[in-house]
Image: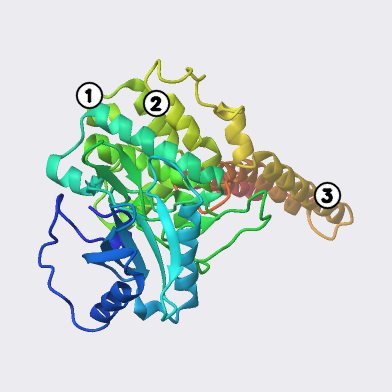
Amino acid sequence: MFSGDVNSADSANIPEGGVEPNDTPVPGRGDELESLIKDELAPELEVVRRLGRGSMASVYLAREQQLKRLVAIKVLSPKLARDERARLRFEREAQAVAALSHPNIVAVHRVGRLSNDLPYFVMQYVKGRTMEERLQAEGPLPVGDARNAIIQVASALAAAHQKGIVHRDVRPENVLYEADSGRALLTDFGIVAILASAESGQAARLTRTGELVGDPAHMSPEQLSGHDITEFSDVYALGLLGYELVTGRGPYDTKSRREVITAHMQGEPRRLSELRGDVESDLEDVLMRCLAKEPEHRPRAADVARRLTAPGEVTPMPPLKVPAEEGVMASIKERRLPQIMIAFGAVAWGVLGVFDQLADREVLPELAYRLALVAVVTGFPAVLTGAWFHGKKGRQKFEPVEYWVFGGLALIWLVVSGFIIIQWRPG
């Protein structure tokens, strides 16, 4: 299996050990590109064959003559040669991964450009298959194997995050399983984003506003809603990956694309132990924390790796950090109840004051003031209810209980107001 599939959705399925099925030359630019690579990279690199071709790049198996090792060469597709954004993204992938040195990240050996100005890079060749292919062939992994893979991917992400790199597309297709060592290696940083770092002081953004880059089934809530992507988005995807490795499916019971997105935004993940009984409690706890809707409530990738590492291999770490404020007070703050109720109280006080003054001056009858008072009294629980269900930042769905609350308050307002009107006798 070659390292770093062309593009997650376009990766070629190469069986372990050798020949790509139906490896018939494709006429056109693909053949020209292969000939160009063979001519320009020889004699240092001897191109053996094409491993796969996707919408963004092609990957070739080659033999590095000096070091006597197999490598993979990834070249930007000629169709994207004039697309500056594609060129920048491709080169950013090479630069980002080349800056990383980690046993669970596919290594980049060198970067260059062909005579036609197409960028390429030479990377580690991995003999094996993707985790997606392993899941399809074997089903859910043994818990121990899944645990080790999660630790290794978390460790790889921690190394990337330390360099200010967010992968953005962590899923089984982008995790390679090395047959000889049993290692899990994270690959395909083709849609990587470079965060603001202490060295550069600025962030490089290579995606258009509102563009979803990657697979929605493996995206975090903030990624789906178009908010800023941080390292905690990768942690959410790591939680999804963990569920798939352990159970063969995700944490949400969904069928359509819309249900998947809704579940990521609002759904409650199923307990891992409900899907598989032999799962350790600490693994279940960590994966559930990874799937927290709010990014700041998730652990860091380094915390996940340390927490799940078997006792004795590293110094035991304390329980994962959780927000200091929890329970009712945290919910009140999160829903901005104090601000909303203070604003309502100020408006209500002002309205009642105006009605009182107008009634004293006989501009309005006292009945108007009494009806306004009833509206304020019944409006208080209505605003409180609305703030509780919709006070958080972002869009929240309308809950069925709200219909009953608002309906009951409206009925009370009508009954009391009607009674006051009936009993009213002008002075």
Task: Give the tally of numbered discs.
Answer: 3
Hey, what amino acid is under mark 3?
Answer: Gly
- Dot 1: element: loop
The residue that disc 1 covers is: 277
Classify residue 108 as left or right of residue 246: right
- Dot 3: element: helix
Hey, what amino acid is under mark 1?
Answer: Gly
Q: Is residue 266 positioned above or below 148 on the image?
A: below
Hey, what amino acid is under mark 2?
Answer: Leu
Residue 400 in sight = no
Classify residue 427 as left or right of residue 210: right
Question: Where residue 182 appears, x then y in whole percent?
Answer: 25, 36
Question: Where residue 134 appears, x then y in whole percent?
Answer: 19, 44
Nearer the N terminus, badge 3 or badge 1?
1
Nearer the N terminus, badge 1 or badge 2?
1
User: Residue 8: which quarter of the image?
Assistant: bottom left
Q: Which mark is residue 142?
A: none
Looking at this view, name the residue that lies furthest to the bottom. 28
Question: Where residue 1 appears, x then y in whole percent?
Answer: 22, 52
